[in-house]
Image (spheres, rainbow, N blue to C red):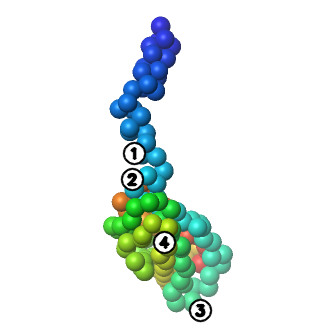
Amino acid sequence: MKKLLILFVLLFCLTSESCKENTSVTAHGTEKGYLVVKKDKLSFGQINRNTNKNIKCSFELTNKGNKPITIHKIDVSCGCLSAEISSNIILPQEKTMLTIRVNPRKQLGHFNKSVYVNSDAENPVIILRIKGEII
């Protein structure tokens, strides 16, 4: 009986105009921008704590959607990280650079940190990972 009820609901949804409208609005890139990161993980390997001051890396963010994206906030998982973005607004099919600085003097040993990019894109949160070992 449950299978019959599920089948009925599924068939109703597939033929209903309201369900068709909802799926077309949320389709990839139709009503909002879609944020893509070329490479979302970066490994520094071993870093000498005494010889390096701040280590810098960059992530390329691209709007693959049809509407502009506004970056609202960038959160870092640790006080040893800082973030700077070249532009908070990314037009359709355009790119921006996100620069992350790691202060190795505030760490020792293995680290695996996260950077959270919050936006109004269809995929509102992008998580970037940075790892390495400070010796």
Which tag, 4 or 2, sits closer to the chain's start? Answer: 2
Q: Quadrant of residue 40?
A: bottom right
Q: Which residue does the image show at 58% across and 67% down from the upper left? A: 38
Residue corresponding to mark 1: 25
Between residues 19 and 52, which one lies in front from this camera angle? Answer: 19
Residue corresponding to mark 4: 94
Q: Give the secondary structure at mark 3.
A: loop
Which tag, 1 or 4, sits closer to the chain's start? Answer: 1
Decide if residue 119 is on the left or right side of residue 106.
Answer: left
Which tag, 3 or 4, sits closer to the chain's start? Answer: 3
Question: Residue pushed farthest top?
Answer: 1
Are dots 1 and 2 in contact, CB under 8 Å? Answer: yes
What whole-number distance in Å separates the C-alpha atoms at marks 1 and 3?
52 Å
Which tag, 1 or 3, sits closer to the chain's start? Answer: 1
| Amino acid identity at mark 1 | Val
- Disc 2 crowd rating (10 Å Cα; few below 14, some 14-19, many 20+) is some
Residue corresponding to mark 2: 31
What whole-number distance in Å separates the C-alpha atoms at marks 3 and 4?
37 Å
Residue 51 is marked as 3
Between residues 48 and 8, which one lies in front from this camera angle? Answer: 8
Note whether 135 is above or below 16 in the view shown.
below
Of badges 2 and 3, nearer the viewer stands 2
Q: Give the secondary structure at mark 2.
A: loop
- Disc 4 crowd rating (10 Å Cα; few below 14, some 14-19, many 20+) is some
Which tag, 1 or 2, sits closer to the chain's start? Answer: 1
- Disc 1 crowd rating (10 Å Cα; few below 14, some 14-19, many 20+) is few
Residue 114 appearing in the image: no
- Quadrant in which the C terminus appears: bottom right
Q: Which residue does the image show at 45% across and 16% down from the upper left? A: 8
Note whether 25 is above or below 18 in the view shown.
below
